[in-house]
Image (cartoon, rainbow, N blue to C red):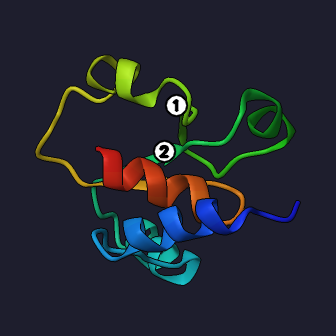
Amino acid sequence: MKHSPAFLKLVEESKTRIRETDIAEVKRRLDAGDKFYLVDVREESEWARGRLPGALHLSKGVIERDIEKAIPDKSRPIVLYCGGGFRSALVADNL
């Protein structure tokens, strides 16, 4: 899907305010036993097709509403992921 220039600008602005990571770093942290929440912000249909082991599902559309119930420990880091890094960047910036 081709994203609109306005959407891409919004994502780029969000990325200036968050800390991004990559799958290699997430794997390293998982292998090291680091304690963090791994949250999939994709849509339900994407989640149903597959997910990272141990991930929680809180889609971009409901995460602000449901995160306190799903993740009560505010001291533990949260790693968000999606299909291309756009939605997770927007969610991270909003949280």
Q: CA distance from mark 1 to mark 2?
A: 7 Å
Screen quadrant of the N terminus: bottom right
In the displayed structure image, the side of residue 80 where residue 40 appears, left or right: right
Q: In this picture, is 32 found above or below 90? A: below
Residue that sits furthest to the left in the current view: 75
Q: In this picture, is 45 found above or below 53? A: above
Question: How far across and down, in percent of the image, does residue 52 sit?
Answer: 65, 52
Residue named by callout 2: 39
- Among numbered discs 1 and 2, the one appearing first in the sequence: 2
**Crowdedness of circle 2 by 10 Å Cα count: few (<14), some, many (20+)?**
many
| Residue sitting at x 81%, y 32% | 48
Q: In this picture, is 31 found above or below 54? A: below
Residue 68, by quadrant, is: top left
In the displayed structure image, the side of residue 72 where residue 58 appears, left or right: right
Residue 41, by quadrant, is: top right
Q: Secondary structure at mark 2?
A: strand
Question: How far across and down, in percent of the image, does residue 46 sit?
Answer: 80, 40
Question: How far across and down, in percent of the image, does residue 29 sit?
Answer: 38, 72
Residue 82, by quadrant, is: bottom right
Q: Amino acid at mark 1?
A: Leu
Q: In this picture, is 37 found above or below 8? A: above
Q: Amino acid at mark 2?
A: Val
Q: Secondary structure at mark 1?
A: loop
Residue named by callout 1: 58
**Crowdedness of circle 1 by 10 Å Cα count: few (<14), some, many (20+)?**
many
| Residue sitting at x 73%, y 62% | 4
Residue that sits furthest to the front in the current view: 6
Q: Count all numbered tags in the image, as a single digit.
A: 2
Question: How far across and down, in percent of the image, does residue 28 sit?
Answer: 45, 79
| Residue sitting at x 31%, y 68% | 18
- Front one among 80 and 25: 80
- Pointers 1 and 2 in contact (C-beta within 8 Å): yes
